Image: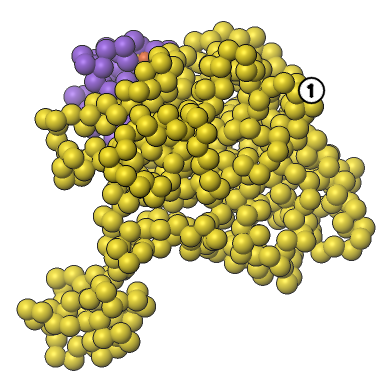
Chain colours: A yellow, B purple
Amino acid sequence: MIYSNNATLLRRELITKLAKLFIEGDIKDIDRIPLQIAPRNSVPIRGSIAKDRAILKYMLMALLGYNISDEEDELMTLAEYAKKSLENHNPGKNILTVVDEACSSCIKTNYIVTNLCRGCVARPCTLNCPRHAISFIGGRAKINTDLCVNCGKCMEVCPYHAIVYVPVPCEESCPVKAISKDENGIEHIDNDKCIHCGKCILACPFGAIMAKSQIIKILKRIKTPNEKVIALVAPSIIGQFKASLPSILEGIKRIGFDKVIEVADAAVTVAENETEEFLERMEKGDDFMTTSCCPAYTELVKKHVPQIQKNVSNTRSPMHFSAKYAKEHFPEYSTVFIGPCIAKQFEGIYDECVDNVMNFEELGSLFIAMNIDVSKIDAPEKISNESEIGRWFAASGGVSNAIAATITDPSMVKGLKINGINKKTANLLKIYSKKCPGNFIEVMACEGGCIAGPVTVCNPKVADKQLKKFFEDNKK
Amino acid sequence: MEKKIEIKICIGTLCYVMGGSELQLLAEHLPEKFKKRVDIIGSTCLDYCLDQEKYGKAPFVEINGEVMAEASINKVIDYLIKKY
Ligand code: FES
């Protein structure tokens, strides 16, 4: 499957333009961006230039850290939002926001009567509809979208198969039914259910779901003369760019970070702690233990599968250990975690050691904005192998392998893997709470692991190949 | 023997971030008849990104010296079928 589509690329273009303006000291001109991308005489993508521009404005609002629903005054300019964001705006504790202007393009009900309808005499659709939502207009069945509750009975009973199911991509992708339409037909995210996995961002073909970004706050930190900033880079960075790991890390430094640390170092500690904890728990007679490094998974447990809360490892995530290390050794520095993940942004809000979180898509856009070409950076090719098992955390199966490599007797581990959280695997976890066929479960919300996160720059298949090649080469 | 076709895929950071990573899978998607004829090579920034007005948008690919903007696997294959 093609991973980068026009909606993703548009987002990257916006981040690049925003970052460029900030760096050049021209953030006050931010209101020009929608005009540049959708100029007066261009062909509109969504019906009209005015609508295109409105949507671009809202996307930029999210990139400045706002909920779209925060808008009180339509006349408030992006420049004003930017100013507020740089001063003291508190972005709140939710991460995802829906650009309502861009949404509403999907159908309201999942069932549609096609022109195969013969307007038959029997009309089982009307008879079986529990809501009396089907009437006949011009000899053909019509579903009243105000009444329809998406039960699907009409489709089942139609002898001509004239009624079809049409999915709503974001709703289909959400593993926990956190996104649904409000009375105006616009998608709404229920924060009591949302686990911040970011799957809806990838699924929406209109790019209507945005993660609220911290990019401008991070740039401000970097540009403040006496502020020192450490970048904590997630293991999944390997394979993201067509460049060696040292070159990528050097590129990150050139953005203006004063220090760059691989989170893989801390992941080694996590593997050690989790191994120890696992042994203790088995001794105690626990049925099983699960990993805790994936924040979308821990959120899933908290909100939807509380019965296995006691089985989740108490060891905190590699991001936390890495940030803690940074704060202990370089107390005067701010910490910015850079990863492939939306949920880490949420975790970061609650982590006392993490000041900001940025994603790979933002990193890639920053490289473009600053003319940093990592494929051309000559950095020393040799890197230390000490954190090798920490780097495994980047892909599905990696944490299990790290534990197996740390434990003295690997035969003790009866490992299971949940490679990707979806409606099915979320259910599976509920079953495991009653009867678990193993004693150690690794859970990663994204299929393939962190390298396939929702806000990366590289096609996950390519990233996986590059990651494997990295481990191959590093063995030599 | 049929003439070789050389495809240069830009792996500069700009092209790569703007969708170029997809092109790394080109080799496995090539139709059989082109598999032997085509040489795929990665190239550092080809400098097309410096002039969007003239060359268009990234990612860029060069096929036997001819530049293609907004390159995708499908676009490259369509071009090969038409031209070779
Ligand atoms: S990065 Fe591809 S042409 Fe410059």
Quarter occupied by the N terminus of chain A: top left
Q: Position of residue A414 (x, y in %)?
A: 78, 56
Q: Residue at x 85, y 62 (%)?
A: A286
Q: Residue at x 37, y 18 (%)?
A: A26
Secondary structure of the residue carrying tag 1 is helix
In the image, taking residue A407 as reference, residue A62 lies left or right, namely left
Q: Amino acid at mark 1?
A: His
Observer-nearest of A226 and A366:
A226
Q: Dot 1 corresponds to which residue? A: A329
In the image, taking residue A329 as reference, residue A1 lies left or right, namely left
Q: Quadrant of residue A106?
A: bottom left
Decide: is A325 above or below B48: below
Q: Can you name the residue that lies furthest to the right here?
A: A283
Q: Position of residue A84 (x, y in %)?
A: 45, 33
- Kindly tell me whether residue A148 is visible in this rendering: yes
Tally of marks: 1
Ligand 1 in which quarter: top left
Give the chain of mark 1: A
Q: Position of residue A117 (x, y in %)?
A: 16, 77
